[in-house]
Each structure stands twice: as structure tokens, then as C-alpha cells.
Amino acid sequence: MSMSFMEGLRTEFKRTWTDGAKRSAVAFANTDGGVIYIGIDDDGTAVGLDNPDETMRRATQAVSDGIRPDVMSFVSVEPETVQGVPIVAVHVQRGSHRPYYLADKGIRSAGVYIRSGAASIPASESAIVDMIRQTAGDSFEDALSLEQNLTFAAARSAFADAGIGFTESSQRTLGLLDADGTYTNLAWLLSDQCTASVKAAVFADGRKEVFVNRQEFSGSLLTQFDQVGEFIARHNVVQSHTGQSMRRVDEYDYSPLVLREVLLNLLVHRDYGLSGPSLISIFDDRMEFLNLGGLPDRFTREDMMNGISSQRNPKLANIFYRLRLVEAYGTGVRRIMGDYRNDSVKPEFDISDHSFRLTLPNHRYSRLSSEEGKATSGTKATSMTGMLGPGVFGPGVFEPKPEVSAGADSVAAVPDVGAAAAERQRVVLDYVRGNGSVTRRKVQEVTGLSQSTAAAIIRDMVERGMLARDGRGPSTRYRLPSAGA
């Protein structure tokens, strides 16, 4: 005898409980809810169950263990009687943490199902993304990552270097894992698999027609910070001359501290919900930084210029702060403008709804303009489309590439291993003389260099006999040779 209802958008029949029923539960939770009747044939005939209690136990366990995120608060499993025989009804409401997916398949079409008519079908990638956005709202970093096979070699190294644990518990606290142990987009940004990229290019002309050098950087944002910073530093010319005190004075095209803050802002304040890379363009007379995403909602240009900070990605900013890459918030723009207080050409901010461009004039060109009372050819910083989000980041010095150029008061034409390297070595030696020893981490801190560059400086100083190694592993310290190795 057939029932008075048939399978449809919110009704599914199963003769017995099978793993295939989990797909229907996922589909109902992702769509508009529904009921899975166990003990009813496809044609609507009630065949009943020999052991309804066992079927209820199996259904409950399968849904609890096999579907992520946890959907049990939206599911009830109840015994019923239809046509005089016992059946089981699995009621599934539409969930509030979509997309729901099969735990063994992950957040992809093979694991995410939706209801279409009387069938449960795989969801398209665009449908999955839409569900993620609806659940997370405007927060990209809180949304579930589509990629769950993530590794964290770069992040583990950075956390270890900062003396911070990178355990499952700390990942939950920081927001890399949600309550169900699923990786968020924040985790993806720090993972080795991150595909959000930065493209950097050096141009021979102001029209972006002739490349001198270009490179694209991807992977963990922590890796990108080091690699992009080193790329920029190679094109930050330093000139050395004798100052009034007869001591060498190094003058950079761009303040290393300003470049560091701009790059940190580029990475931390980007709108990662928009596709496309960040762009860094280097010319003789300027650097341009383009980021996707304008200012955060209800945040104005005046707020930014007045030193008010608004975080688009607060959890990402918090991690950079914990890693001591970010020192404070709210003074970055004022520091940048203060760095150009004596220059005739000032930094320019060009902000639209979906992009943020910062143009930094080359100090050498800008100051020549001030001295000569007229603009040097090409000095005016033209508008492109780039970014520097609001916020302030801590001290640090990118390694510059000195220029082989001799003026009337020039000390020497300095190669990359000359003045800049000597200055870094002097800073390290001054610290050792004042404190007795130094660690590689402390060298990073006092010079503002990356981990790999700080290690290279120490290695070179040891090889030259300027420092002596004391100990092995993380506890290694470096002293003056006279103090004993």
C-alpha cells in the first residue's frame, strides 16, 4: 500500500539506514531542511524495521561522526509508526553554520551536497563559497578555508622564533581552527599553500612599459613579508658621505622603517575576499603600493590621516603583533608623512571603493627638487592604484642596496657588502660590548632584519673572527673573541 506522500524537496525515503543517507542529511542542512524516513521504500511503501532502536543508534552516530561542522543541534531522530509498522524519522533543520559537508570528503563538491527537487546533488564551488560568505558575514579570516590540506612550516618557524607555541590549542585561540577543528581562511593565509600573492616589478620608465626586474611571491604571508622585504631592499639605494662630525652618513632613497611599515600594512590590511595580487611598482623617482580593498566600512580618509586605526583583519593583525612584527597601532600614516616633512614632494594616498594606493617619492629626487626650487623631471608622484591600510607597525630595517655613486663629499662607492653591512655589524658589536653576548633572535630585534639575514650576518662575523660562538642550538650565544668562545 502506497503512502499519501512522495519523495520531494524536503522528503527522502530509505529502506534501511546506509551511509548514503548522510548525503541527504548534509543536503537538508545546507538547503531548507527535511526528513529522512528509514523503513520506507522508494515508492512510498512502508516496509518497517526489525530493530528501530538499533537504526536510531546508527543514524545518530553516523550523523554525529560523519558530518562537519557539528549538525546535531539541528537534528532529531525519532521512532514513528506508518501503516502499522515501525519506522524511524530523521528530522534535519537548515543549519546556521553552512556549508555542512561529509567529514571524509572535506569542503569540496564531493563532500558538500544541496537539495534539488527529490535529489541530493553535489554543490558547485560557487555555491560553497556563497554559503561560506553567508555564514561568516564580512569576515574573510573567520570563514572556513576551501583548502583543508594545509601545512605550516613557515608559521611554525616564526612562532618558535618568537617563543610562542603553535599547538592545536593555540591555533584555536588565535582563530586558525574553528570549534570543529576545521581550518579557517586565517589559517590558509599563514599556511605554506596560500595563493594570495604579491607581484613586485622594477620599471625602466614611468609608463610601466619596460621591465628591469619582476617577481611574484606566494606562500605564507610570513614568508612573503621576508621575501618581498628583501626584494624592495635590493632596490633601496644608499649613498654614503662624510657629515659635519667627520663620520660617515648613509642616506637611503626610502626610509627602511617606512618601507617596513608599508609592507606590513600591505599584507595585514588587504581585502583577501577580492581576487588578484597586491602590486608593488618601483621607478627611479617613486615606489607605488597597490592593494585590493579600500578603507573598511565607515572608516574615512580623515580618520586614517588623524592616526585612527581600523583593522580589516583583526586576528591576522593580532598574530603579527604577537610575533613582534607589529609594535603598535595608530601612528603609521603620521610616521610616513613625518619622514617627508623636509621634502617638496609628499606621499600620495589614492583611495577608491576597491583599491588603496600609496605612492612614496624617492627622497633623493624629492630633496633635489627642494634644493633647486623646481621639480626634477619625473619627481611628481603620479596616481596609479595601490594600498596602505591604516595602522602602525614596529621598528625594523630592510637591507638596502647601496648605489655606486660618488659625490663631492662621498666617502666611497659602496657595494652591498660595504656601508650597509658594516653598519649592521657595528650595531651588533655595540650590543655585545654593552651586554656581554647576543643571540640570533636579539640580532633580528636590534637590526630589524629577517631571521635568515640575521643568521647570515652572524655567520659572516664568526667566520671573520669578529664574534665567537658559545653553545649550540636555540641557546647559542655570541661573544667577543676576547671573552672566550
Image (cartoon, rainbow, N blue to C red):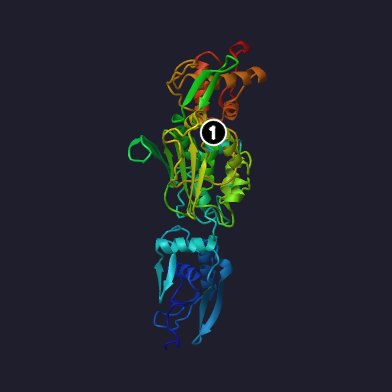
Question: Which residue: 48% across, 64% down?
Answer: 131
What crowding class fits label 1: few (fewer than 14 Cα within 10 Å), some (14-19), or many (20 or more)?
many
Which SS class for mark 1?
Answer: loop
Expressed as whole percent of the image width and height from the top left, the position of residue 211 reads 34, 37
Q: Is residue 373 above or below residue 293?
A: above
Q: Residue furthest right?
A: 435
Amino acid under disc 1: Asp
| Quarter of the image with the N terminus in it | bottom left
Q: Which is more toward the observer, 133 or 169?
A: 133
Q: Inspect this view and state whether residue 198 appears.
A: yes
Q: Inspect this view and state whether residue 18 appears.
A: no
Q: Which is more toward the observer, 219 or 114?
A: 219
Q: Is residue 469 above or below residue 368?
A: above
Residue under pointer 1: 343
Question: Which residue: 42% across, 21% down?
Answer: 404
Q: Residue furthest top?
A: 482
Expressed as whole percent of the image width and height from the top left, the position of residue 301 reads 57, 50
Expressed as whole percent of the image width and height from the top left, the position of residue 136 reads 54, 60
